Amino acid sequence: MNHQNEKWDVQLRKGSLELVILAALKSRKLYGLELLKLLHNFETMQITEGTLYPLLDRLKRDGQITANWIQEGENRPRKYYRLTEQGDQKLSALEARWRQSVSDIEYLLDHPGPKPVNPQGD
């Protein structure tokens, strides 16, 4: 990947990371390292622990996720994160904005040129 793509990925990640975390926790609970590994499956979402854990702490303070320590057998306890009702509502709102943004960008990419743009067709 070239330097220009890396800069783009960093900016894209900054703007969408909250959405990505909330989406990853929809209908399931994950512990931190599990969440980090999940994100590393996606080329543009590879973040560090130093980025993930402060964001999880903020989302918890904001009431969008909960965190509970769970002991599993002989392993040390793990802190599992899951969405709250408020987090689910925030995810729905962010998802709607994301989809609108993608639609707007796709329209502009598909309709280049000097003519004025009116995506609503007025």
Image: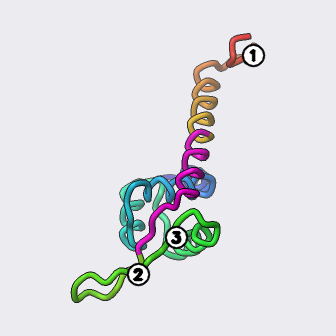
Vertically, is 121 above or below 76?
above
Mark 3 and 2 residues: CB-CB less than 8 Å, in contact? no
Q: Describe residue 72's horizontal placement relative to residue 85 as left or right.
A: left
Q: Residue furthest top?
A: 122
Please tell me whether mark 2 or mark 1 is closer to you in this view.
Answer: 2
- Say which residue label 1 marks: 114
Q: Which residues are magenta?
A: 80-96
Secondary structure mainly formed by the magenta segment: helix
- Few, some or many C-alpha atoms within 10 Å of disc 2 (few <14, some 14-19, many ≥20)? few
Q: Along the line of sight, which residue is nearer the eye, 51 or 66?
A: 66
Q: Which mark is residue 52?
A: 3
- Say which residue label 2 marks: 69
Tell me which corner region of the image, top left, top right, bottom left or bottom right, holds residue 57: bottom right
Say what secondary structure mark 2 lies in: strand
Q: Name the residue located 58 percent from the left edge and 39 percent from the top edge.
A: 96
Type of amino acid at the residue the image marks with label 1 = Pro
Q: Residue furthest right?
A: 116
Please tell me which of labels 2 and 1 falls first in the chain. 2
Q: Describe residue 92's horizontal placement relative to residue 80 as left or right.
A: right
How many numbered badges does the structure rendering display? 3
Q: Residue 89: where, in percent of width, then height?
A: 57, 50
Q: Name the residue located 38 percent from the left edge and 65 percent from the top edge.
A: 29
Q: CA distance from mark 3 to mark 2?
A: 17 Å
Type of amino acid at the residue the image marks with label 3 = Leu
Magenta region includes residue 88? yes
- Few, some or many C-alpha atoms within 10 Å of disc 1 (few <14, some 14-19, many ≥20)? few
Q: Along the line of sight, which residue is nearer the eye, 34 or 26?
A: 26
Magenta region includes residue 82? yes
Please tell me which of labels 1 and 3 falls first in the chain. 3
